Amino acid sequence: MNNFTDLVSRLLRFALRLVFALAATVFLVSLMLASLVVVLAVSIWSLLTGRKPAPVVLFQQFRQARERYAQGMFRTGAAASDVVDVQATEVREHGAPAPAPADGPVGRLSR
């Protein structure tokens, strides 16, 4: 009797494993099919509207940022050949009086 129960339990375990493996396979195939349908629908929609899909644009922006970073665009020091235009401002000492406001839009506002 003991051999018979062992055989039945082994058969049931094998059947249960087979059912779970089959269920996992069906789930994965349906997930792949659903993703394929979504990709095709988004591709057709982008062809009809003439715009790139949002995920494609987002990944292109990430790739461009990575390439800029790899090329050294975000380096902190300026090279000798770089030219930087700035507005010159006068630096006064702490106790020096401020000059009279000039005529112009800023001067008129401060009077």
Image (spheres, grey):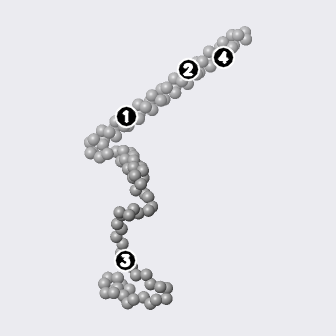
Q: Quadrant of residue 35?
A: top left
> Which residue position holds label 3?
88
Residue type of the residue flagged with mark 1: Val
Q: Quadrant of residue 29?
A: top left
Residue type of the residue flagged with mark 2: Leu
Q: CA distance from mark 1 to mark 3?
A: 61 Å
Q: Earlier in the sequence, mark 4 or mark 3?
A: 4
> How many C-alpha atoms fall within 10 Å of the one at disc 4: few (<14), some, or many (≥20)?
few
Numbered disc in front, either 3 or 2: 3
> Which residue position holds label 1?
37
Asked whether 111 or 100 is in front, the reply is 100
Do the numbered discs 2 and 1 sit on residues whose CB atoms are within 8 Å? no
Which label sits on residue 9?
4
Do the numbered discs 1 and 4 sit on residues whose CB atoms are within 8 Å? no
Residue type of the residue flagged with mark 3: Ala
Q: CA distance from mark 4 to mark 3?
A: 89 Å
Q: Residue furthest right?
A: 2
The residue lying at 43 percent from left, 81 percent from top is 91
Asked whether 20 or 76 is in front, the reply is 76
Q: Earlier in the sequence, mark 4 or mark 2?
A: 4
Do the numbered discs 3 and 2 sit on residues whose CB atoms are within 8 Å? no
Q: Position of residue 20 (x, y in %)?
A: 55, 24
The residue lying at 45 percent from left, 32 percent from top is 31
Q: CA distance from mark 2 to mark 1?
A: 28 Å
Numbered disc in front, either 4 or 3: 3
> Which residue position holds label 2?
18
Q: Earlier in the sequence, mark 1 or mark 3?
A: 1
Q: Earlier in the sequence, mark 3 or mark 2?
A: 2
Q: CA distance from mark 4 to mark 2?
A: 14 Å
Q: CA distance from mark 3 to mark 2?
A: 79 Å
The residue lying at 73 percent from left, 11 percent from top is 2
